[in-house]
Image: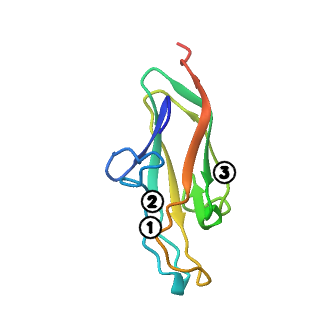
Amino acid sequence: MGEYVTIYDADTDVAIAEAPTIAGAVTFRLRADLSEVGTWKELYAKSDEGYEILDCLVTPTGTTVALWQLALDTETPGAYGAVLDLDTVEDGVEKHFYVRAKALDTEVPTNDATVTLVVSGDAAVPEA
């Protein structure tokens, strides 16, 4: 996913694809005619061994970002399109979060691959 941190699918423990690759990406099959909302998918961020990520943010970007929602838990999700603050991703500790997408009945059905989850933060060596 970048240097020092990787996003994984919590069900399979497989790393999520990095843009522009779409094989292994987070996907949803939604019916636009029903304005369907996808079920939550659990992901986690994990830092490279020997590092922690301070002020770690997950930012959805792309054309249809307003249709994507992130959350630390499924009971209190953020607004659609909003940045998710993971705080610190500690060395060797999985930081779990959730993602879902929705479709609108006003959109043309398409295989939309425009949204990317960008992870940012400050990598540091943990204090002993």
Query: Cβ–Cβ below 8 Å for labels 3 and 1?
Result: no
Query: Cβ–Cβ below 8 Å for labels 2 and 1?
Result: yes
Quarter of image, res 15? top left
Identify the mark at residue 41; answer none if there is no mark: 2
Residue 69: % across, % down = 59, 61
Identify the mark at residue 105; answer none if there is no mark: none
**What amino acid is labelled 1 in the image?**
Phe
Label 1: element kind = loop
Residue 110: % across, % down = 49, 74
Residue 93: % across, % down = 45, 33
| Residue at figure coordinates x 57%, y 45% from the top left | 118
Q: In 3D space, how far apart are the residues under numbered discs 2 and 1 (Cα atoms)?
A: 9 Å
The tag earlier along the polypeptide, 3 or 1, is 1
Residue 67: % across, % down = 61, 67
* Residue for badge 3: 83
Position of residue 75 in the picture relative to residue 41 (left or right): right
Position of residue 85 in the picture relative to residue 40 (left or right): right
List the single residue furthest toward the front: 20
